[in-house]
Image (cartoon, helix red, strand yellow):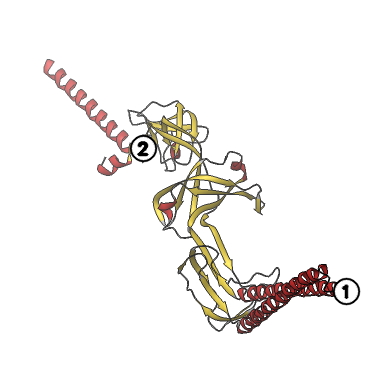
Amino acid sequence: MNGANTSRWLLRALAVIVLAAAAVFAWNATRPAPVAVVLAAAESGRVETTVANTRAGSVSACRRAKLATPLGGRIERLAVREGDRVKEGQLLLVLWNDDLLARERVSREQLDSASARVREACLLADNAVREAARTRQLRDKGFVSEDRVDRAESEAKSRQAGCDSARALAKEAEARVTAARADTARTVMRAPFAGIVAEVNGEVGEYLTPSPPGIPTLPAVDLIDDSCLYVTAPIDEVDAAQLRIGMSGRVTLDAYRGKHFPGKLRRIAPYVLALEKQARTVEIEVAFDSPGEVRHLLVGYSADIEVVVAARDAVLRIPTAALMPGNRVMVLSSQGMLEERRIETGLTNWEYTEIKSGLAPGERVVASLERAGVKAGARAVEEAKAAAAPGK
């Protein structure tokens, strides 16, 4: 009897164990798999509040001249090509000007002739003055009459007037030479500053036409002073009030991925550009801190600007991508469960957000909030660990 009871008890116990194992198996088989998430730990670091451009900016030169001749004419000589580096005052282009050079030579010859007449007239005037002085001496001794003295003095004054007239004519001839040279100079183009030739529009023998008023035409030579560069970009009108001249900034360029160029805010436009009703912007300019490091940059490169409005060092921070609306984050607990938590934030930018309260150093938050299944109460596992153990 005792043996039969024992057997029944063992059978019942075995049945309970089997049922429990089946229940555990069924529960494990039917519950949702852990969500693979990207985690970021709350850690100490620097957080900045920045203002960035709304559309791509560009690298510009402090001086750029689109040069054109004030006169139209045929290109006689083209002294530079695109890409040439020139010095200040270097010859760039000459229009056909043989007629103007001939007029200039005529003016110089007229000036030489006028100068010779000045010398002649003034010599005669000096001689007349001396003759008048001698005549007065003779009158004082009683050798000549007063009438003779009057004629001598009148002659001296007449000769002096002729000298003055000749000098005036010489000055007029000199002015004509200056005018002729100015006319000739209008056919010669020289570099107003040292730089690099960015563009040349025209070839020898082609005719250049100056721009009519209000109708822009292509420049004969586009000259850029690349020794001084800066970046200009538009920012949203809402952000403009936060900016001050001298604030630090960073410049990034598509041509140099991963590299930042430090700079300073040097200009804030005193007006708003309303290119679109929904996109009103203010132009700002950032000068590079180290001009020597950016000499290799090309004018026209697309660039982005970040101006640092405020910054704090050694504060608790998390990636901004982990922040949900309402200053909430999804924290992974030590049991592998996701829990929603409200936090207090400080400075923030597109990369990091300062945490004032609600998180402890080292706690991990979800940075992949867009993934399906990320919600409070869900099981989660770090993506790197999930990849290492795909069968779990």
Question: In x, y percent, where is residue 179?
Answer: 68, 74
Q: Is residue 103 above or below residue 334?
A: below
Give me the C-alpha separation between circle 2 and circle 1. 122 Å
Q: Amino acid at mark 2?
A: Leu
Task: Indicate the secondary structure of the residue bearing disc 2.
Answer: strand
Q: Amino acid at mark 1?
A: Asp
Residue with the most extreme right position: 147
Residue 73 as seen in the image, left or right of residue 376 = right
Of residue 42 and residue 100, the one placed in the foreground of this image is 100
Circles 2 and 1 in contact, beta carbons < 8 Å: no
Question: In x, y percent, where is residue 374?
Answer: 42, 38
Mark 1: give few (<14), some (14-19) or many (20+) Cα within 10 Å.
Answer: few
Residue 297 as seen in the image, left or right of residue 209 = left
- Mark closest to the chain's N terminus, 2 or 1: 2
Mark 2: give few (<14), some (14-19) or many (20+) Cα within 10 Å.
Answer: many
| Labels 2, 1: front one | 1
Residue with the most extreme left position: 3
Of residue 115 and residue 366, the one placed in the foreground of this image is 115
Please report the residue visible at 74 percent of the width from the left and 74 percent of the height from the top: 125
Give the numbered dot on residue 386.
Answer: none
Give the numbered dot on residue 147.
Answer: 1
Please report the residue visible at 30 percent of the width from the left and 38 percent of the height from the top: 29
The residue that disc 2 covers is: 39
Q: Is residue 22 above or below residue 141?
A: above
Q: Quadrant of the N terminus?
A: top left
Please report the residue visible at 43 percent of the width from the left and 56 percent of the height from the top: 295
